[in-house]
Image (cartoon, coloured by chain):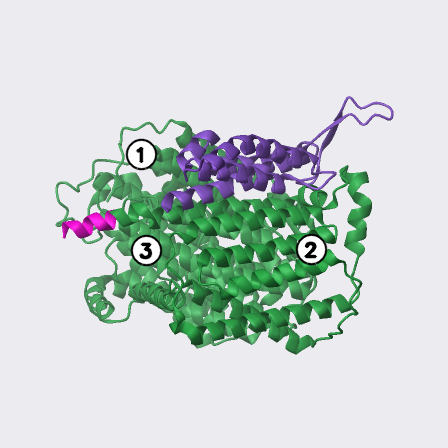
């Protein structure tokens, strides 16, 4: 299915041209940092953000972040050039370009941030831009569901990660990653290590779609193809891997790290590559191979050894290159033939020779055939697996199975559509020639790089692999060398077995696919499980709401005051009370009068059978409070109290006209219960107040405001100066609440009021 | 409500209340008062009007939707907070200008704090009126 857009649309437009120019500019800027980083240096830039909380916008360019940054901006440039043509003429092309550029900048923020809080903010920005891009075809229900699913899964992981980040901040006393790394084992030796590990790994595993959180990634293929190429294979999903790599020096080296990453990574890699074989939609196939790659990366980040880490870093680069190329290539095929079905496509090489070339280059790198970079990567993986400290057999078996399946899938994706027989290809789906050049540059260049780096790995080694390994292990000497020919050794034998197994799997893949489909249909599906989970949450919420929101105001009040009472008693139980009845001061006649007035008001409110009278009684109590404020010279508070009291009576009066009459005597028992609760709350609060007045008051703030009010804020009314100047930001928050509350109340009144009622009435009349 | 006494009293009280609310707002920095109290007093003026005549009359007398009033107020308060950015100071730091100030003479103080208080006034008034009008219309 090609996205609905006009082929003849102008790619030469602002939304078409600006993103690739931005991306290319950034790429060039990062390129200039290469010499520094290759020499083992790093570049740091700090802008203060919230210095009071240790949150700064600090960025570091070291080997790891530079490798990621170059991949993001480099692949970004090609993908954006590609989408300039792919999306040309789409009515929302500009929106698409905005989202894609915003994503790229957020992702750069993730990999460059040296402050964990800043990293988290950028992390969530990638989640949000990913949500917008997956749901780009918002008219389609599938897209919307996939977008929401991705948002919820990765968002939940992000929250776990935030919790982990905060625990790290508490343990280490700083959010700066470079400082935490410099402290060595401070996190590993902390009693909170397990909590930190679980929370951070949850964030990483959801983002990088490890089992059992993998299901959102294949669904995310609902996004336009350039998005799948960029976000959901080359960059964003590697965010989790990046996080694990970033935290590697501080968290790795424990048994729980080793085994968790080994098992989850290994299972994900094998599971994904088996399921990849089952898919017929080429994009889905690639989505599952991306899962396999992510699993492999996690698997190799488990171990601390030089080979494993070198293998992980090299594989990361290889995968980004060939996977982006393959996605873009499939976009070309889709664009020209209108289908992505592996069972239909065949013989395209005559019409699309350049696309076929790109596919072959990328596919062979994916299959790990010499002399491509993929071959070097696979050798390294085997060497890393052989030195694994977890379980050599498990790691090697997982890698072998996954690699063999990748070989087969590579052949299905890159060879079959171009060189296979095309007996099923309908006239409608036959290719209409080569895709435009903007769409060919990307796959050709990325595929070609896989070959170039395979033949000449030294540049890559010096500028990317060694600095990155140094960033992870702290020692550039740990980086192993990238060779095409490393002599006859176990890894070479394993490669041979991989090819053999891969060829067998490819030849049998149709039969295997039929079998897998049967198993898959019968077994538990995480995707359907997710739906059941969501339905369960909604039901649970509905049940709880039915219990709590009965619509009876008295019950709400009971719950509110009961909770207040329980909370107060809990506090008292902990701290105890220190009540000393102070000697009664000499009171004026007017003070006794106010007290008597308030008691009378209370009596009226409690005894009366009329709601209006009860409200009036409450008003009297409120005005009594205002009088007390006046007597003890707090005019501002008194005026406010007076005005609020008046307005409350008016509001109540208006609302009372809609309420039913007060219930009759039959609820006498309930009234005694209410009275008991009211007296209990009142007594408790009084006791607490007496305890509080017993202690010494800390008057530092009062003195400060009294002293500073006129000299620095030019006001003599301290209350007002605090409200509008010293604490203006708080006041701003409060008036925002006022606006939101008023708007919500108005909306509720309009919805549940006359209009809604008259509508339902007319409907009743009709029936 | 159709009461001659209330109608007649309202005609006199409403302008008085409005002027009083402005007075309370402006004096607030040095004497009891301020935007919050002013807004409360100002809203009672229109509530009186609504009770005496009708909510529709009160709405047309206000000329602008109370919800909009509240949001404009919030915007003014935010603007007052942002002024300090121009002077490279922390958000919501008060900025003062003393017009015509000379030796021993303070001049006329104009400040972002005053703008903030006017924002509070409008938010309180708009919020309460939105609520009261909506309640009265639903009864």
In the rendered image, residue A343 lying in the magenta stretch gets the answer no
Q: Which residue is mark 2?
A: A628
The numbered disc on residue A219 is 3
The numbered disc on residue A639 is none
How far across and down, in percent of the image, does residue B134 sit? 41, 43
Tell me the element at label 3.
Answer: helix
Distance (Cα) linking label 3 and label 1: 23 Å
Q: Which residue is mark 1?
A: A90
Tell me the element at label 1.
Answer: loop
Chain of the residue where label 1 is placed in the rendered structure: A
Chain of the residue where label 2 is placed in the rendered structure: A
Tell me the element at label 2.
Answer: helix
**Does residue A700 appear to the left or right of A158 in the view shown?**
right
Query: Earlier along the polypeptide chain: callout 2 or callout 1?
Result: 1
How far across and down, in percent of the image, does residue B65 sit? 45, 34
Up the image or down, A374 lies above or below A272; here it is: above
- Image quadrant assignment for residue A511: bottom left
Confirm or deny contact between disc 3 and disc 1 (CB under 8 A). no
Residue depicted at 78% across the width and 52% down the height: A702
Image: magenta residue range = A759-767
Where does the N terminus of chain B fall, quadrant-wise?
Answer: top left
Tags 2 and 1 both on a single chain: yes
Chain drawn green in the picture:
A
Distance (Cα) linking label 2 and label 3: 65 Å
Front-most of residues A228 and A550: A550
How far across and down, in percent of the image, does residue A576 sit? 69, 77
Residue A663 appearing in the image: yes
How far across and down, in percent of the image, does residue A327 sit? 34, 48
- Image quadrant assignment for residue A434: top left
For chain B, give the colour.
purple
């Amino acid at each position: 299915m090609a996205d609905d857009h006009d082929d003849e649309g102008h790619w030469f437009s602002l939304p078409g041209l600006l993103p690739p120019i931005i991306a290319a500019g950034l790429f060039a800027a990062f390129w200039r940092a290469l010499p520094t980083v290759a020499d083992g240096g790093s570049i740091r830039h700090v802008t203060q953000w919230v210095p009071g909380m240790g949150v700064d916008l600090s960025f570091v360019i070291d080997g790891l972040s530079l490798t990621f940054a170059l991949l993001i901006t480099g692949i970004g440039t090609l993908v954006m050039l590609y989408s300039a043509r792919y999306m040309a003429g789409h009515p929302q092309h500009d929106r698409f370009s905005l989202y894609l550029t915003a994503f790229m900048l957020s992702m750069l923020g993730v990999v460059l941030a040296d402050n964990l809080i800043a990293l988290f903010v950028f992390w969530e920005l990638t989640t949000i831009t990913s949500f917008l891009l997956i749901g780009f075809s918002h008219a389609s229900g599938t897209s919307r569901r996939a977008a929401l699913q991705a948002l919820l899964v990765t968002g939940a992981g992000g929250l776990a990660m935030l919790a982990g980040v905060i625990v790290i901040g508490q343990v280490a006393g700083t959010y700066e990653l470079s400082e935490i790394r410099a402290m060595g084992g401070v996190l590993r030796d902390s009693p909170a290590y397990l909590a930190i590990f679980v929370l951070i790994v949850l964030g990483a595993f959801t983002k990088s779609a490890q089992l059992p959180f993998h299901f959102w990634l294949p669904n995310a293929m609902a996004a336009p193809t350039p998005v799948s190429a960029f976000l959901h294979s080359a960059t964003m999903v590697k965010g989790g891997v990046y996080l694990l790599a970033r935290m590697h020096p501080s968290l790795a080296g424990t048994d729980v790290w080793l085994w968790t990453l080994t098992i989850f990574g290994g299972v994900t890699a094998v599971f994904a590559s088996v399921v990849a074989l089952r898919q017929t939609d080429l994009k889905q196939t690639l989505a599952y191979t991306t899962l396999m790659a992510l699993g492999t990366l996690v698997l190799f980040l488990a171990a601390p050894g030089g080979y494993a880490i070198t293998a992980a870093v090299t594989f990361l680069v290889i995968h980004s290159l060939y996977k982006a190329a393959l996605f873009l290539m499939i976009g070309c095929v889709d664009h020209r033939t209108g289908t992505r079905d592996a069972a239909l496509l065949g013989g395209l090489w005559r019409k699309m020779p350049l696309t076929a070339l790109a596919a072959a280059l990328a596919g062979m790198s994916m299959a790990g055939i010499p002399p491509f970079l993929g071959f070097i990567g696979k050798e390294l993986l085997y060497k890393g697996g052989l030195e694994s400290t977890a379980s050599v057999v498990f790691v090697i078996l997982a890698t072998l199975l996954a690699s063999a399946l990748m070989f087969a899938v590579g052949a299905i994706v890159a060879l079959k559509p171009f060189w296979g027989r095309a007996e099923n290809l309908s006239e409608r789906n036959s290719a209409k020639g080569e895709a435009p050049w903007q769409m060919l540059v990307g796959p050709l260049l990325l595929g070609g790089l896989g070959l170039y780096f395979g033949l000449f790995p030294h540049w890559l080694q010096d500028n990317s692999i060694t600095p990155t390994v140094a960033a992870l292990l702290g020692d550039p000497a740990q980086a192993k060398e990238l060779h095409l020919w490393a002599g006859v050794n176990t890894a070479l034998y394993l490669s041979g077995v991989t090819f053999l197994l891969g060829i067998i799997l490819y030849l049998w893949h149709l039969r295997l696919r039929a079998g897998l489909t049967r198993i898959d249909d019968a077994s538990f599906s995480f995707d359907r499980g997710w739906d059941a989970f969501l339905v369960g949450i909604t039901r649970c919420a509905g049940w709880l709401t039915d219990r709590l929101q009965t619509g009876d105001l008295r019950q709400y009040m009971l719950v509110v005051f009961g909770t207040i009472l329980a909370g107060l008693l809990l506090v008292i139980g902990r701290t105890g009370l220190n009540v000393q009845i102070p000697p009664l001061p000499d009171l004026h006649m007017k003070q006794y009068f106010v007290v008597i007035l308030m008691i009378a008001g209370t009596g009226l409110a409690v005894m009366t059978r009329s709601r209006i009278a009860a409200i009036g009684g409450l008003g009297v109590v409120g005005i009594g409070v205002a009088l007390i404020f006046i007597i003890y010279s707090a005019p501002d508070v008194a005026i406010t109290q007076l005005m609020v009291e008046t307005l409350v009576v008016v509001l109540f009066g208006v609302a009372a006209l809609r309420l039913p009459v007060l219930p009759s005597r039959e609820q006498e028992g309930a009234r005694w219960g209410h009275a008991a609760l009211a007296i209990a709350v009142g007594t408790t609060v009084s006791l607490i107040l007496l305890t509080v007045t017993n202690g010494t008051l800390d008057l530092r703030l009062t003195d400060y405001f009294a002293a500073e009010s006129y000299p620095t804020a030019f006001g003599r009314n301290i209350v007002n100066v605090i409200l509008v100047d010293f604490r203006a930001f708080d006041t701003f928050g409060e008036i925002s609440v006022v606006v939101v509350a008023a708007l919500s109340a108005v909306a509720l009144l309009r919805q549940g009021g006359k209009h809604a009622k008259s509508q339902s009435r007319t409907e009743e009349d009709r029936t | 409500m159709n009461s001659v006494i209330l109608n007649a009293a309202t005609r006199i009280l409403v302008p008085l209340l409005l002027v009083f609310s402005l007075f309370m707002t402006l004096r607030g920095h040095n004497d009891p008062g301020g935007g919050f109290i002013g807004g409360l007093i100002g809203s009672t003026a229109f509530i009186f009007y609504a009770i005496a005549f009708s909510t529709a009359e009160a709405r047309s007398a206000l000329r602008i939707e109370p919800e909009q009033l509240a949001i404009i107020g919030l915007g003014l308060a935010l603007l007052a907070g942002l002024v300090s950015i121009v002077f490279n100071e922390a958000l919501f730091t008060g900025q003062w200008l003393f017009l015509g100030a000379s030796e021993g003479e303070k001049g006329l103080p104009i400040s972002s704090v005053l703008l903030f208080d006017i924002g509070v006034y409008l938010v309180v008034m708009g919020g309460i009126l939105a609520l009261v009008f909506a309640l009265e219309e639903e009864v």
